[in-house]
DNA sequence: CCTCCATATTTTGGATCCAATATTGAAAAT
DNA sequence: ATTTTCAATATTGGATCCAAAATATGGAGG
């Protein structure tokens, strides 16, 4: 069961379920490819199937689960081709976001990025996989948000969600965590100097490392 | 081939409702900004509110409607900033799709594109706004599909959906229809010669014309 | 032993009913 | 006349129940 009962429960059951499902998928409690039994899940979450199904529809739209009429939902499973495609699209969209962000970057933004990075380093040192994923995401999204293109950021976020099921495996490795920290530092350095090209390049490399690692993970499922 | 009123009803009510809602929004029967009364709509479509709500969740994920807890759904209304952002993202993604498509283009693909274009010209000549929108979409999606990147195409399709509510206004003008026909011919010409750069350029211009027209439509709502 | 078909069980899809929240309108107080 | 309060109403959110479809089961026939 999820231990943290301190966080306030969302105003609707579907939103609560949505959060729980995301967590279950990203932490690997629901494995890619696993079918989702509505009845069992609904009972476990103490809600009826109606809000559960609406949450699943949302996740379907985000590509986190797949759906077939009269067959039901499954946690999405990425093929190697899918993975490469997602990362290629991210490359295109994130480049745009970074370039726009650099144009409008304020000292305040830089401050937020630096504190996000501090959080990443803390989590990396502590070996806290979940915190690492959260902090890393915050770092990147903080940057993208600076672009002032909310729809673009929403798309990027959705693409990130797609591979979230595999992210926990990725951060399980200490070497990966350490490299992420270094690559963020390089990005931050470029951003401080408003060097857009360099920032884009460092992030491309960052991404390439991640996709290479994930590819090997996909070949040898745990 | 299309326009058969005896189209088979989808295997689930939510899919049926989804299609009807898309149609209602793209044809303007549901105006941008209009709140969606679930009870009335459900009765009109002869279904209960459950499948209606699931269809709305799907549309929310695609950005066609907005949702606020306990307040309900509205047909999404695009600001000028939104419109420009959507078209900028399309520019990025469609360029990728076209370049990949050119690399893999077969004679068969070209044949499909040409027949799609014939359909566009027929609809343009007949002044059939709905057929025009459908055929135009088919033309572009046929091209994008050639890229062999299903997720990319899915994203592009979603972005198209976002502005569908305004497309019917756009094709109401005979000059717009005529220009679309010419621009498609230019694109086809470039594709036949596998001239990727040129194809990208013609499509960029095509898009720029559309966004310019839509911008004026957004300023002077009917 | 395998295949095929009929049947039982499981699981999803949808309709109805009830609860919770938001909105509206009218009456009362300033 | 304006604002506030509170009840009445409309609308959304969710639970339960039933229907439809898919899957599993088991037996008859080859």
Image: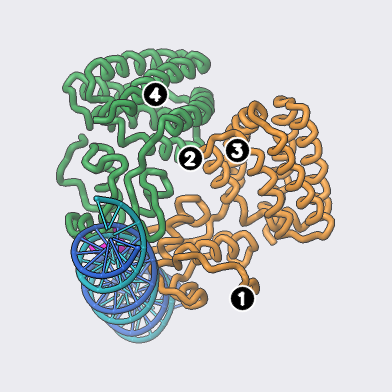
Chain colours: A orange, B green, C blue, D cyan
Q: Which residue is mark 4?
A: B211
* B104 versus A24 height, above or below: above
State which chain disc 1 sits on: A
Q: Which residue is mark 3?
A: A90
Q: CA distance from mark 3 to mark 2?
A: 15 Å
Asked which secondary structure carries label 1, the reply is loop
Location of residue A170 in the rendering, given as x and y in whole percent from the top left corner = 72, 53
Q: Are marks 2 and 1 on the same chain?
A: no
Point out the image quarter for the N terminus of chain B: top left
Q: Report the predominant secondary structure element of the magenta stretch.
A: helix
Identify the image quadrant of residue A99: top right
Of marks 1 and 4, the one in the foreground: 4
Looking at the image, tell me whether mark 4 or mark 2 is earlier in sequence order: 2
Q: CA distance from mark 1 to mark 3?
A: 34 Å
Circle on res. A1:
1
Using the rendered image of the protein, determine whether residue B208 is visible from the camera's viewpoint: yes
Of marks 1 and 3, the one in the foreground: 1
State which chain disc 4 sits on: B
Location of residue B5 in the rendering, given as x and y in whole percent from the top left corner = 15, 43
Range shown magenta: B47-52
State which chain disc 3 sits on: A
Asked which secondary structure carries label 2, the reply is helix
Q: CA distance from mark 3 to mark 4?
A: 24 Å
* D11 versus A185 height, above or below: below
């Amino acid at each position: 069961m999820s231990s943290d009962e301190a966080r306030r429960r969302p105003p609707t059951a579907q939103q609560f379920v949505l959060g729980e499902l995301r967590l279950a998928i990203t932490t690997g409690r629901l494995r890619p490819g696993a079918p989702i039994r509505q009845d069992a899940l609904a009972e476990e979450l103490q809600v009826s199937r109606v809000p559960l199904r609406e949450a699943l529809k949302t996740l379907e739209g985000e590509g986190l689960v797949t759906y077939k009429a009269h067959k039901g939902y499954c946690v999405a499973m990425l093929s190697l081709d899918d993975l490469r495609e997602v990362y290629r699209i991210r490359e295109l969209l994130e480049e745009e976001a970074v370039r726009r962000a650099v144009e409008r970057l304020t000292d305040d933004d830089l401050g937020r990025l630096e504190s996000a990075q501090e959080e990443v380093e803390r989590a990396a040192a502590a070996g806290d996989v979940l915190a690492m994923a959260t902090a890393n995401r915050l770092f990147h999204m903080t940057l993208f948000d600076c672009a002032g293109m909310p729809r673009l950021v929403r798309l990027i976020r959705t693409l990130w969600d797609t591979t979230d099921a595999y992210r926990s495996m990725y951060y399980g490795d200490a070497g990966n965590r350490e490299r992420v920290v270094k690559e963020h530092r390089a990005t931050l350095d470029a951003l401080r100097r408003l060097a857009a090209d360099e920032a884009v390049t460092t992030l491309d490399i960052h991404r390439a490392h991640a996709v290479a690692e994930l590819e090997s993970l996909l070949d040898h499922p745990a």
